[in-house]
Image (tube, coloured by chain):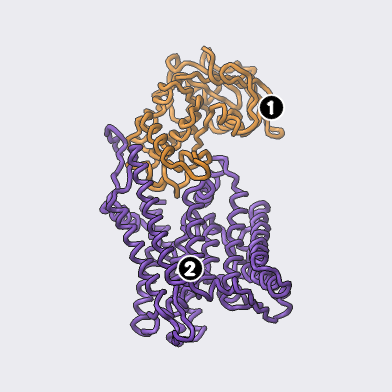
Amino acid sequence: MTVTISPKIKHETPSIRGNVRGYAERVRGGDMGALPAVFGLVVLCTIFAVLRPPFLTAGNFANLLTQGAAVTVIAMGLVFVLLLGEIDLSAGFASGVCAAVLAILLTGEGLPWYVAVGAAVLTGVVIGTVIGTIVAKLGVPSFVVTLAAFLAFQGLVLLLVKGGTIIAVRDETILAIANKNLPPVLGWILLVAGVAGYAALQLLRARKRAARGLSADPLSLIALRVGSLALLSGLAVYFLNLERSRNAAVVSLAGVPIVVPIIVVLLLVLTFVLRRTAFGRHLYAVGGNAEAARRAGINVDLMKISAFVICSSMAALGGIIAASRASSVDPNTGGSNVLLYAVGAAVIGGTSLFGGKGRVLDAILGGAVVAVIENGMGLMGYSSGVKFMVTGSVLLLAAMVDALSRKRAAATGLR
Amino acid sequence: MTPVLELRGIDKSFGPVQVLHDVDFFAYAGEVTALVGDNGAGKSTLVKCVGGIHPIDSGAYFFEGRPVHIGSPRHAAELGIEIVYQDLALCDNLDIVQNMFLGREHRRGIVLDEDTMEEMAAKTLESLSVRTVKSIRQLVASLSGGQRQTVAIAKAVLWNSKVVILDEPTAALGVAQTAQVLELVRRLADQGLAVVLISHNMNDVFAVSDSIATLYLGRMAAQVKTADVTHAQVVELITSGRSGDLGLTNGATA
């Protein structure tokens, strides 16, 4: 290597071309990011749309969103644990336990919805604290701890719902989450507010950086980002605002499902935590090099425990959404394929199983892939057996892409 | 001139094994002090005592002439003592700025103040005349060995530190990168820092150091001006603890 003598450290002025080039370099170097998920989503949607035209209807689109919501929310929490290179296999049944707590308090005790939701989330916090403490302080591998918890929580759900009965959920507010829609006008208002807010933040940041002489994103790039966000979300809102009811005169069914803005808010909050706070920075650091983080004065144990707390709390929210969608809680809530779909969603979206790499948005993209497979194959009339095998293959494929890209990154010196 | 760092009669044992015997050590501002010695001579232990990782059993520790008691690595860092370990302790998945401020991030409220951190990192790298990195927002994973060493050193001097201890900074580097890092080491001293350089490479030691401290089996054989000794003398000090008039008297050797 030669010593390059230049008067100043070069700031590469970011431009659309520069960004595209940088992205292409990263992908070639093995950092695929969300590319496989986006690619898979496009391919899957095309296939299903061609083979089964009903797949593309507004009704099915709304259905798909509420179908995938619970898994996606659990996957968003799993990202935090995966970032540290740990795993939480109990997230599925943890969501079941929290949903059972919710249902018992609502239906059994007749408490108001906010008390029940608070108790469910608190249950998640307690679960995460216990698991995280065992992993961090005792050093038991998270795989084993959460596998044990997986079994134990499966039993706990059974005990809570008294040996296999079904607890119905009748609370209007809880039911609305996954079954009701925003008024179409409100959908548009939220969309405009969201896009305008995003644009304002981007512009403000660029201006502030430019004022301090730091490299700032050019207007063209910001316009492109804001434009694509507006286009995609605009299309989605337009679609969802179409009348989906077969008999609109009797009951109108239009608007964005309420669960969608809930997920968007969770995405914004969690992304803010990961990208803009010291806590998030330290999570990445622990996942990248725990020893370096420890020497930098970061409390590694505390970071681990908090990651598990966030994961289990998100699982609780996922459980609430699942209870809302099913209008009931039974011993299988959060069971069977929920956990594997959630882990699959996070990994398919591009979160690394080796830690240190991942975004909350990944979980949503991966969750969309999982939901599309589930939904599309259902429309095609395939049995659960085939669905499981396909989803399993996709998860394996995603894990292989993760491992391969890591190898490639090591070869090109990117990791 | 009072040394920035002065150790007098340091003893350190791990159980029944006494690793350091009555060690004296000085490091002056604006100078590079090389710390040499064979494997197991006690270099790492001495550095860890300085950095507060190991408490000393007995002896006196002066910082800028004042006696201090270093209880923890954090305490040492507060005084302005930074150690760059051989493994560098960088996170591959974070960029240069994020690594330099790891654990000591600037924030406004709860939000990270990225702009200030970026400015400070750029200023520090510039003051060290580091020009080999393309962008300070590059991931550390994409840096070469010499660049990583540079980032680790820049991280150490970011905090107005007064003493920077480098543990074998050139051990894993090629010829050109070694020259670059040594140049950086010299520049640190020229900026008024007390630099302690641990090295096995005599060429490196003679290229940049002002004085050489030689440990032999846990004892300080000699701390001498680099200009006053030859290559051969230092090698003799490392291997046998004495060289002519220099070094340990026979009775003192273990």
B248 displayed left or right of B225: right
- Separation (CA) of disc 1 from disc 2: 63 Å
Label 2: how many residues lie within 10 Å, few (<14), some (14-19) or many (20+)? some
User: In this picture, is B81 found above or below A14?
Assistant: above
Name the amino acid type tagged 2: Val
Front residue of B70 and B97: B97
Name the amino acid type tagged 1: Asp
Q: Chain of mark 1?
A: B
Residue A269, visible in the rendered structure: yes
Q: What color was chain B assigned in the picture?
A: orange
The answer to which image quadrant residue A11 occupies is: top left
The residue at 66%/28% (across/down) is B56
Q: Which residue is mark 2?
A: A260
Q: Position of residue A54 (x, y in %)?
A: 39, 84
Q: Quadrant of the C terminus of chain B?
A: top right
Q: Position of residue A270 (x, y in %)?
A: 51, 56
Q: How many marks?
A: 2
Q: Chain of mark 2?
A: A
The numbered mark at residue B57 is 1
Front residue of A188 and B138: A188
Q: Dot 1: what SS?
A: loop
Q: Can you name the residue that lies furthest to the front here?
A: A249
Residue A148, visible in the rendered structure: no
Front residue of A239 and B244: A239
Q: What color was chain A assigned in the picture?
A: purple
